[in-house]
Image (cartoon, helix red, strand yellow):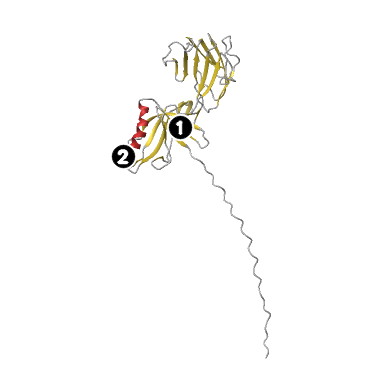
Amino acid sequence: MPLLVGALVTTPPPPPAPPRPPVVRPTPINPGEYVPTFIDPDGVEWAMNPPGQEFFTLNAVTGYGITPVELITRPDPRGGVVVAGVRDLPRTLVWPVRIRDRTHLGFLARWRAIGDALAKTKRKGPGLFRLTRPDGSAREVLCHYQGGMEGEPGGGWLDDTPELSLLVPDGHWRAPEPIKIPWSSGDVDDYFAPYPMISSGDVLGDAVTVTNPGQVEAWPTWRLEGPATQLVATNNTRGQAFTIAHDLGPGEYLDITTRPGRVTDQDGEPVMGALVRPGSVLWRLDPGANDLDFAVTGGGPATRLTLSFYPRWETA
């Protein structure tokens, strides 16, 4: 008998899956590195995180934030206290490092070298600690070594991890280079332009606006180069002025430091009585614009006056 054969039914294959779009991964951003440097009182620079594994900074640094303060309070009769004032305090910069070498003598030489550089601040005055950011900008502090190189248990043979403690008396970070603004009574070149000159009548012209780009007040230093007999410097923004009265001949000069307040001559000797008292205030530059003017008497073609200051900030 004949066989009944059904029609062969075939299922068409599914369409191919669309190709997956390529995975686009963002290019990693290189955040860059900050570069710490200690500059000892002799001006020798010590990289605190140089290339290599023999000496480097650990990721446990503290003390580079907002300048610490002391709140001055008095009791409030209704409870609590009233904040009567705020006083900036020194800061302590804690900078742990690893020092090591393959041999004991190699480690010892490295250990002694950095220790000797830090110890100079005990006898020669403060060093500088500078942080340079990836964009090349930098801020620094004057600092004194106060501890950390005592050695830790189990160290001292091929390696050790001192936790350097540096006292920063000011508490604020400053620019590495001061801003300098000169004035002249004689012929000037491009160095002095566009700053005004002391006129032939011994009196500086119109008021000058000096901008402090820092975050906090700046304490300027002045240099008055003779001949001159008197300088009157006024900060119209603060409503304060000071007067320096001292006979200066050509080639002589005075340095007027507003913090701490002192006047010294070209030999570094204090000039007693040069600052006229009472009535003189060695004023500061507030953040932003400061309207100033000056008057110099007894001047001549060689008379020069230079204002310089370091902008300062709360953080590194």
On the image, numbered disc 1 is attached to which residue? Answer: 130
From the top left corner, tell me how far across and down residue 33 is, in percent.
48, 39
**In front of the other: label 1 or label 2?**
2
Residue type at mark 1? Arg
For this view, does 200 lie left or right of residue 150?
A: right
Front residue (pair 72, 54) = 54
How would you rate the neighbour count of disc 2 (Cα within 10 Å): few for under 14, some for 14-19, many for 20 or more? few
Residue positioned 38% across, 33% down in the render:
165
On the image, numbered disc 2 is attached to which residue? Answer: 105
Label 1, label 2: how far apart the Cα atoms are: 29 Å
Cβ–Cβ under 8 Å for marks 1 and 2: no
Front residue (pair 97, 163) = 97
For this view, does 134 lie left or right of residue 207?
A: left
Residue positioned 52% across, 19% down in the render:
307
Front residue (pair 60, 67) = 60
Using the image, tell me which numbered label, if any, was put on residue 278: none
Residue type at mark 2? Leu
